[in-house]
Image (tube, rainbow, N blue to C red):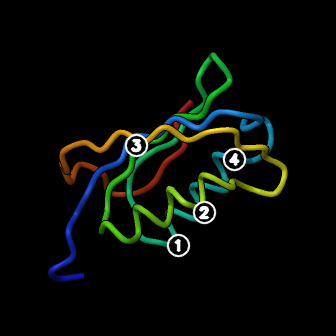
Amino acid sequence: MSGAEMVRAHIFVSGIVQGVGFRWSMQRMARRLGVKGWVRNLPDGRVEAVFEGPRDRVEELIDWAKRGPSWAVVEGVEVRWEKYRGEFTDFEIRY
């Protein structure tokens, strides 16, 4: 991916997004796209994720998060763009 702009996104997904395979599905999609980072459930019922990669791949994962897996009902996705750090080697589920 030489020449691709590398970016970092910090997202918060709200709706029915816990207990529906959201984290596992996001990990699978991120790995397929070659995006690195993590995802976790928050106590308030949202899902939080931080991930990095080429801009087009990161935007594709954000678009996926707006739909989620078939059992999820996504009501909103808040996206915060952050400075790329290149700190991740994989995409993991955090507990």
3 or 1: mark nearer the eye:
3
Q: Which residue is mark 2?
A: 28
Label 2 amino acid?
Arg
Quadrant (top left, top right, bottom left, bottom right) of the C terminus: top right
Pointers 1 and 2 in contact (C-beta within 8 Å):
yes
| Structural crowding at the residue carrying mark 3, measured as other residues with C-alpha within 10 Å and reported as few (<14), some (14–19) or many (≥20) | many
Question: Where on the picture, by quarter, is residue 89?
Answer: bottom left
Which label belongs to residue 22? 4
Q: CA distance from mark 3 to mark 1?
A: 16 Å
Q: Position of residue 5 (x, y in %)?
A: 20, 69
Residue at image position (40%, 43%) is: 50
Label 1 amino acid?
Arg
Question: Where on the picture, by quarter, is residue 26?
Answer: bottom right
Which label belongs to residue 32? 1
Residue ranking furthest to the bottom:
2
Label 4 amino acid?
Phe
Pointers 4 and 2 in contact (C-beta within 8 Å):
no
